[in-house]
Image (tube, coloured by chain):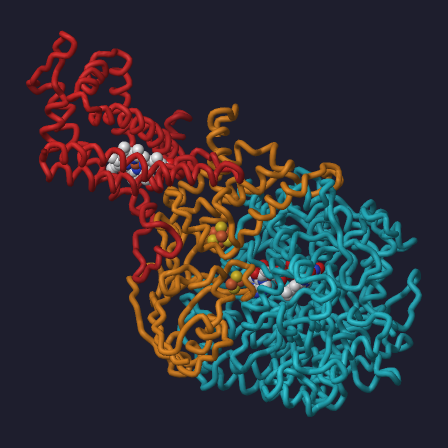
Amino acid sequence: MSWVSKTLSSTLGRKLLMALTGLFLILFLVVHLAGNLQLLLPDGGDSFNVYAHTMANNPFIKVVSIGNFAFILLHVIYSIVLTQHNKKSRPVAYAMSNEGKSSTWASRNMGILGTVILIFLVVHLKGFWYEAKFGTLPTTMIDGESFSDIYAIVAAAYANIWYVLIYVVSMGFLAFHLSHGFASAFQTLGLNHVKYSPLIQKVGAGFSILIPALFALIPIVMYIQSLS
Amino acid sequence: MNLTLKIWRQKNNSDKGGFKEYKVSDISKDMSFLEMLDVLNEQLTEKGEDPVHFDHDCREGICGMCSLYINGNPHGPLQTTTCQLHMRSFNDGETITIEPWRAKAFPVMKDLVVDRSAFDRIIQAGGYVSVNTGGVPDANEIPIPKTIADLAMDAAQCIGCGACVAACKNASAMLFTSAKVSQLALLPQGQVERKRRAEKMVAQMDEEGFGACTNTGACEAQCPKGISITNIARMNREYFSAVVSNTELV
Amino acid sequence: MILDSKIPAGPVAEKWTKHKFNVKLVNPANKRKYDVIVVGTGLAGASAAASLAELGYNVKAFCFQDSPRRAHSIAAQGGINAAKNYQNDGDSVYRLFYDTVKGGDYRAREGNVYRLAEVSVSIIDQCVAQGVPFAREYGGLLANRSFGGAQVSRTFYARGQTGQQLLLGAYSALSRQVANGKVKLYPRTEMMDVVTVDGKARGIITRNLITGAVESHSAHAVLLCTGGYGNVFFLSTNAMGSNVTAAWRAHKKGAYMANPCFTQIHPTCIPVSGDHQSKLTLMSESLRNDGRVWVPATVTMAEKLRKGQIKANDIPENERDYFLERKYPSFGNLVPRDVASRNAKYVCDEGRGVNETGEAVFLDFRDAIKRDGRKTIEGKYGNLFDMYKQITGEDPYEVPMMIYPAVHYTMGGLWVDYNLMTTVPGLYALGEANFSDHGANRLGASALMQGLADGYFVIPYTIGDYLAQTPYDKIPTDHPEFKKAEKEVQDRIQKLLTIKGEKTVDHFHKRLGKIMWNYCGMARTEEGLKKAKQMIKDLKAEFWTNVNVLGANEELNQSLEKAHRVADFIELGELMVDDALNRNESCGGHFREEYQTPDGEALRDDENFAYVAAWKYMGEGQEEELHKEPLVFENVKLTQRSYK
Ligand SMILES: Cc1cc2nc3c(=O)[nH]c(=O)nc-3n(C[C@H](O)[C@H](O)[C@H](O)COP(=O)(O)OP(=O)(O)OC[C@H]3O[C@@H](n4cnc5c(N)ncnc54)[C@H](O)[C@@H]3O)c2cc1C
Ligand code: HEM
Ligand code: SF4
Ligand code: FES
């Protein structure tokens, strides 16, 4: 085995990939959120549609989004590999276990949390990304140019209370995933320091609440808007 | 106190094993947990039943020989070793569930006794400074900042009990392994072999079949010696920088 | 047999250097032709096994725990002495030598002790090189403290876990040799007998504690590094598994046992809380630097205290008897271990003991806390206070601690010469298992030093001298001597398993312990010892007819393990009593009430007892034969110890 594949098949190497991909996804969440928040601008979706257009046609963004898919895939594959390995490391379970005393629920259930997020991602991508890419889209005129009206698809989806509920609940799962994942990734990378770790933990806690909350805000607001 | 004990009994490594219930009475609050089991064993022997086997030696919280997963916690409800746990931590009439450490890398040998030789093999993989007896420099030749020596000592306190593995949902040995890697990575004496040590010890840890680390922190919370998971971060650092920069193919 | 200590001639400071030059050497290429068995992986065993493997010998290392790292040395708290004189306070090899001989109440060999002091400096160097994290000053250099009343600061320490750190250092060196293939480890393996061929030790018989398999191991030399036998008292600060079996089996195969009655009783242990007690916990001696030892001045007051009618803190100053300060104004609470222990016993015997069992005295920090503040005391003893609280459930910051003496260390052991060889050629004893360096009383922080000195710096030289004169030929384990020894072991196991009596092994062990503690403990009398001898004989007879050992041999069987050990303890107990009866004097840890000064101090008899009492086993049921090795003092002046 080459040293690279040897390293990447060690438990530490696998965790390294989890942490790096996880951190990338965190970064992606921020960018994605910044874009999505434009849905709330009171311009009938114009800025959002322009943004979506730029994203879809910029070659750099294209590369990034392919990378993004690859990273999600890697993150998911390695999460399965690790979770399976970890399960096998304790073939006989305890009859009585008081794990809640010494670790958080989220940290013990990253697999479940991740799986829910994955299901959401599939639904989410099917609804928007797939439609945008392969579906037939309505168009809208902005400043005399024709743009695909993705805003309309989004608005239609968020008028559905079930969709909104799924979205909001999923963001709850994401929040838990991040509540452990954010700081954990730094620990995995070995970035632990008496002076900075408390800060990382605080930022992580804030991040894990703020980002999913803002994500969840969008469908809620749009749903309310759809009522009037 | 009168207690009901639900204890894992298993004849040997290949036996399936199962729980058995026992009653003990007149247990004094001042007894240690192991002394309570001594009382049970005297009773069982007098009745002609095989006594419950468990590991123990120093009964002072330092040899790391005692184990036992008590009511869902390694070493019981306090952050100490089982031998230092006293019956005043329990209530009259309580049922106490006692299980062996559970991990693929720690096979059960009998009842509550497990085989922890995997830990020895991890140390054998590189948990040392390769100096022969004699021919070393004077002890005061290399000054070591007190803070560094103290940090190294914090890590070196590990007693090798395996509670970290028992506590971890993944049965991971990261805390144990990182404690030794850290101790030697911090000290000037450990610098020479720093890279190969990190690589080899991690490889051995994996080979033994321990799980990976999810950073849940359960190990630290349950470690009787309070070994910190900052050691795990340090080991990760050591390992990653070793694999990318080591000129030796380990 | 005339006991030849083989101490080299010449000035004491040159003996070891000269000896190292005179011993025969084994050619580096030939070392791999020799096999060495090391039983025990404590400080002595692990350091010896690692060092011999580094030299090229093939080593097999045995221990009964599941890992060599758990040997009882791990429990030592206080520290390790070395004549480094890093503190510029007047220490020297000569002073450490002098202190150790004097501290041993002049019952140790000058030559051995000098060598110990001499190599002590190398031990610290070695440990630091291995990565032992000793305490340091802010300047980065090693810190020292004064320990056990020594006049200089020569004790190196690693928090309260010095033994642990030293042992982990030796264990790491051992692990490295395991990885190199030079040491083969046998954990969870108990040595059951020594095998001699043509009068020389050529191997051992072991029992695999998991499978019960009885196996033979052949070698050119055997090292016993199996620790002390304090557990003959049942209750002691030793680990539960500490035993005399290995040494006792060797004794029965011809190795003499020296000064077996010399036991050390440590004054600051947590008192017994009831019959369930399985072991005693040591509280570091350093506590006596700030704690004041006292009991109520009157028996009536003590009785009220025991019945719980009053509390310690209610007793007014004038009703307290700070007996050590009263009797020893200049040393006060810091008198040596034996003196402190004996005086605690006296006040309790008078009926002034302070706990329910009447066997405890107070160690009070009230005044120290008042003087230095709680923070300072916490900084010095925080972990000890926590440990005390965990065990007793009482908070020593609020109420005085209770302490009582407990058996801690055995100075006696297998007789060895200057080369650490027993009276059986090829059989060596190292560490606490031998008798060599501490005389009648061991100074604090000297046992760790001795174990490592023996293993790292003495045996690697002296074993070569023997092996160089031994042919390479290996003796196969189907040799009749091995078969015979194996059969004896198996017969003994079967015998124990078939008695199927009424009483558990622990029952006998506890009874033996009581006899030893009452009659051969802190204070001994001829009458009591004679009584004890008969009681032990009876106990032995009862054990072999009425012990109940369940289960089979072919499994993990902890009752069977214990039964073997207790059977040997019973026999050892009788020899200890013989030795104590023979020694008509008081010295160090051996206090015969008949021999004391008018004010109750130990009275030595240098005229008649300046010798090592080495006992030869004469066969089942026979009285053992006494051999005397006279002690010659050329450098140290014999004086009466006084701490007034
Ligand atoms: C609580 C406590 C505190 C102490 N503090 C100090 C201190 O501060 N400073 C100091 O200098 N000294 C101290 N001592 C004394 C010191 O720790 C011991 O004397 C010393 O460590 C003994 O080392 P050893 O290598 O001879 O034996 P041990 O460490 O006792 O090792 C014995 C070895 O022999 C093995 N063994 C025994 N019998 C068998 C058998 N039949 N078959 C196979 N293997 C066997 C065991 O498995 C073990 O590996 C203390 C002792 C105690 C009890
Ligand atoms: C936007 C989406 C996601 C983000 C931002 C994210 C982020 C993270 C981060 C930062 C970590 C911590 C890594 C470490 O401990 O070093 C992590 C761990 C984990 N993630 Fe995700 N993740 C996401 C989606 C998923 C998905 C879809 C799954 C899969 C099914 C998943 C499964 C896991 C698992 C199982 C772990 C724990 C791995 C372990 O045992 O250590 N995650 N995630
Ligand atoms: S790290 Fe803690 S829990 Fe794990 S083996 Fe060491 S002392 Fe035990
Ligand atoms: S028996 Fe030694 S740590 Fe518990």
The one of B87 and B198 positioned closer to us in this rendering: B87
Image quadrant where residue A92 sits: bottom left
Query: In this orientation, does residue A210 appear?
Result: yes
Question: Which chain is cyan in the rendering?
Answer: C
Examine the rendered structure and indicate whether residue C276 appears above or below residue B153: below
Examine the rendered structure and indicate whether residue B127 appears above or below residue A99: above
Q: Position of residue A154 (x, y in %)?
A: 13, 27
Q: Position of residue B201 (x, y in %)?
A: 48, 39
Image quadrant where residue C294 sits: bottom right
Examine the rendered structure and indicate whether residue A112 appears above or below residue C12: above
The answer to whether residue A192 is left or right of residue A214 is right
The one of A42 and C395 positioned closer to us in this rendering: A42
The one of C48 and B247 positioned closer to us in this rendering: B247
Report the residue at 44% width, 52% height from top.
Answer: B164
The one of B64 and C530 positioned closer to us in this rendering: B64
Q: Quadrant of the N terminus of chain B?
A: bottom left
Question: Which chain is red in the rendering?
Answer: A
Question: Which chain is orange in the rendering?
Answer: B
The answer to whether residue C167 is left or right of residue C8 is left
Q: Position of residue B130 (x, y in %)?
A: 61, 38
Tally of numbered tags: 0
Report the residue at 35% width, 50% height from top.
Answer: A104
Q: Position of residue C266 (x, y in %)?
A: 70, 71
Query: In this orientation, does residue A88 appear?
Result: no
